[in-house]
Amino acid sequence: MKSFVINGQRRLCGETDIQGSKNSVLPIMAATVLVNGESIIHNCPELSDVDAAVKILRLLGCTVKREGHTLIVNSENVNSYEIPDRLMREMRSSVMFLGAILGRMGKAVLSTPGGCEIGLRPIDIHISSLRLLGVSFADENGKLKFDIPDGLQGTRVTLPFPSVGATENVMLAACTAEGITVINNAAREPEISDLADFLNKCGAHISGAGESTVIIQGVKSLNSAEHRVISDRIVAASYLLCAAVTNGNICITDVVPSHIGSVLPVLREMGCTVETGINTVKLLSPEKLRRIRLIRTMPYPGFPTDIQAPVTAALSVADGTSVVIENIFESRYKHVGELLRFGAKIHIEGRMAVIEGVNTLNGATVNATDLRGGFAMLIAALAAKGGSVVLNTEHIDRGYEAPELVLSKLGADIKRTE
Ligand code: UD1
């Protein structure tokens, strides 16, 4: 089994740059399906989720080349509209290809994505919104069949919740629809703006991305473009928390500080000194972190659900009791059982976690339960006294590019083993 072996309590110091955003590059890769030509995507992180998206693109008929952190996708010969079950299972977010496949091929066949480690993750909002654009849908024994009998028609779509994936799917489908589509209560995540920036470079007409109303004027077709993916705000916040639990002093570069605008005040409240530059964040951590009275996860620009597990791990060693409320996913506390193995004191009640800070965590052998929950294990292991083993690293590799290299460079004692 693949694992990380960590000797904790090494102070993290130094500088590291932040990888490209997973949650940006995946929908942008899906968007390349709409392009009648070549898409050149820079700052593409090396992640297993990106590999899964490459497999989907190839299966749909695209040619994909990787040159370091640049991905070159040629979509001239897209000839399939089906994503098989094994790929839907490999990456649950493969559902974001739906809008693009519909826009390009006029139909799509996917299998039911099913639940995952952090919750049920239904796609009802995606489906009901696409229906408004003229998409018909049938579930034939787990095969989800989508058709567009009269072509995609622009319309007004009001999302019942600002779902990131549903906003992206509607944007993708609306790019080449007839007329204007208006999405109300759209998700406002920076990754939505990045997707719109890429699509607009390809010739789409999208305005308002990053705000709650997005307007898409349909165009006939999309053309070749070159784009640099934004940096990963979740990875940035994750490494800041690594420094915070090790009395560290680090500078992260190639970040957009405003993208972690809800996380920085939390780090300051924990006692860290945080300074932001144009593309940098410097963090100096105190000897003992302070508790946070209350953190609620919210859609952007609120505190990200993807940082809930990492911050919970960090608060395990804070002075005092903190409360975290998870508002986005219904069962995103699987990591807590593993944190208890380090000696953390955390109680869960429904969507609330009460974290009683302890003086020291002790090294332990733990499982990475999911992507962000897995990174929370690394944070706890860095803070813990003695050696730890984090098993099932494949979850972490979905979203963090070579974390052992980043952390070793900053002074951590961490190795990857088979
Ligand atoms: C995206 C991110 C993920 C992040 C999440 C919330 C990507 C690839 N993933 O996931 O890292 O944790 O946003 O910030 O960008 N929901 C429904 N029906 C739907 C769609 C969503 O009930 O049709 C619910 C979900 O179960 C969840 C909530 O809405 O409880 C938010 O989901 P959504 O914003 O869609 O997240 P994803 O796009 O899947």
Image: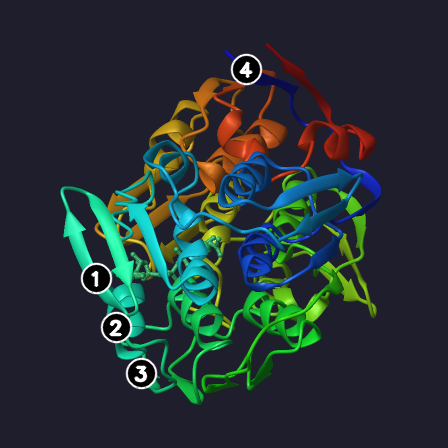
In the image, residue 210 sits, relative to residue 385, either above or below, namely below
| Real-space CA distance between mark 4 and mark 2, rounded to the nearest whole angstrom | 43 Å
Which mark is first along the chain, 2 or 1?
A: 2
Which numbered disc, 4 or 2, marks the residue that appears first in the sequence? 4
Q: Is residue 96 above or below residue 115?
A: below
User: Do the residues under discs 3 and 1 have CB atoms within 8 angstroms?
Assistant: no
How far across and down, in percent of the image, does residue 151 sit?
Answer: 35, 76
Q: Residue 2 has which mark?
A: 4
* Visible residue check, residue 19: no
- Side of 116 where 221 appears, left or right: right
Q: Residue at x 27, y 65 (%)?
A: 127
Q: Earlier in the sequence, mark 3 or mark 1?
A: 1
Tag nearer the camera, 3 or 1: 1
Callout 1–callout 2 Cβ contact below 8 Å: yes
How far across and down, in percent of the image, does residue 328 sit?
A: 34, 60
Residue bearing mark 2: 131
The numbered mark, 4 or 3, whose residue comes first in the sequence reads: 4
First reached walking from the N terminus: tag 4 or tag 1 = 4
Q: Is residue 135 visible?
A: yes
The residue nearer to you, when weighing 32 against 349, is 32
Which residue position is annotated with label 1?
137
- Examine the rendered structure and indicate whether residue 28 appears above or below residue 367: below
Left-right relation of 384 to 186: right
For label 3, the SS is: strand
Question: Which residue is denoted by mark 3 in the rendering?
Answer: 158
On residue 415, which mark appears?
none
In the image, 348 versus 255, the foreground residue is 255
Q: Amino acid at mark 2?
A: Arg
Residue at 42 percent across and 33 percent down: it is 344
